[in-house]
Image (cartoon, rainbow, N blue to C red):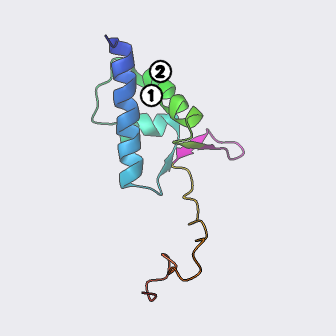
Amino acid sequence: MISREDAALAYVQFEVLSYVADQPKSCETLEGITRWWLYRQRLAGGSALVRKAVMGLVREGRLVERRLAGTSPLYAAPPIPPFPPSSDPSAPDPRDPHEE
């Protein structure tokens, strides 16, 4: 059986990833994630739970941490990698809408 803490952690991670999926250019501090991204949520663990959830997502590579001098770390979606080159030279480039 899953513990309440594990369920709460999974829920916060889901909410953070949902927000990032809807707003892929978003970038925010832990405090901002708690206040702005999850503002509707009433979390029993509060900011400690958000921190644990975000750090878990960073470890998994589902969020990245950005550091700027003199500021708190920012968290965002990882960059989208470019399409790999096709091994079929006759295949159209999926990035070019004019090729058919």
Q: Residue at x 58, y 33 (%)?
A: 59
Q: Residue at x 61, y 70 (%)?
A: 85
Left or right: residue 37 compared with residue 32: left
Quadrant of image for the C terminus: bottom left
Q: Position of residue 30 (x, y in %)?
A: 51, 35
Q: Compared to 20, does 43 lie above or below? A: above
Is residue 36 at least partly visible in the picture? Answer: no
Residue tagged 2 = 48
Quadrant of image for the N terminus: top left
On whether residue 15 falls in the magenta region, the answer is no
SS at circle 1: helix
Q: Position of residue 78 (x, y in %)?
A: 55, 50
Specify the quadrant of the image occupied by residue 10. top left
Question: Given the image, on which type of amino acid does mark 2 rest?
Answer: Ala
Q: Residue at x 68, y 47 (%)?
A: 68
Specify the quadrant of the image occupied by residue 98. bottom left
Q: Residues within 10 Å of mark 1 (few under 14, many from 20)?
A: many
SS at circle 2: helix
Left or right: residue 15 compared with residue 61: left
Specify the quadrant of the image occupied by residue 24. bottom left
Q: Position of residue 14 (x, y in %)?
A: 36, 36
Question: Given the image, on which type of amino acid does mark 1 rest?
Answer: Val
In the image, 65 versus 30, the foreground residue is 65
State which region is magenta: 65-76
Contact flag, marks 2 and 1 (Cβ < 8 Å) = yes
* Mark 2 to mark 1 CA distance (whole Å): 5 Å
Is residue 95 at least partly visible in the picture? Answer: yes
Label placed on residue 91: none
Label placed on residue 50: 1
Left or right: residue 35 compared with residue 62: left
Farthest residue to the bottom: give it: 98
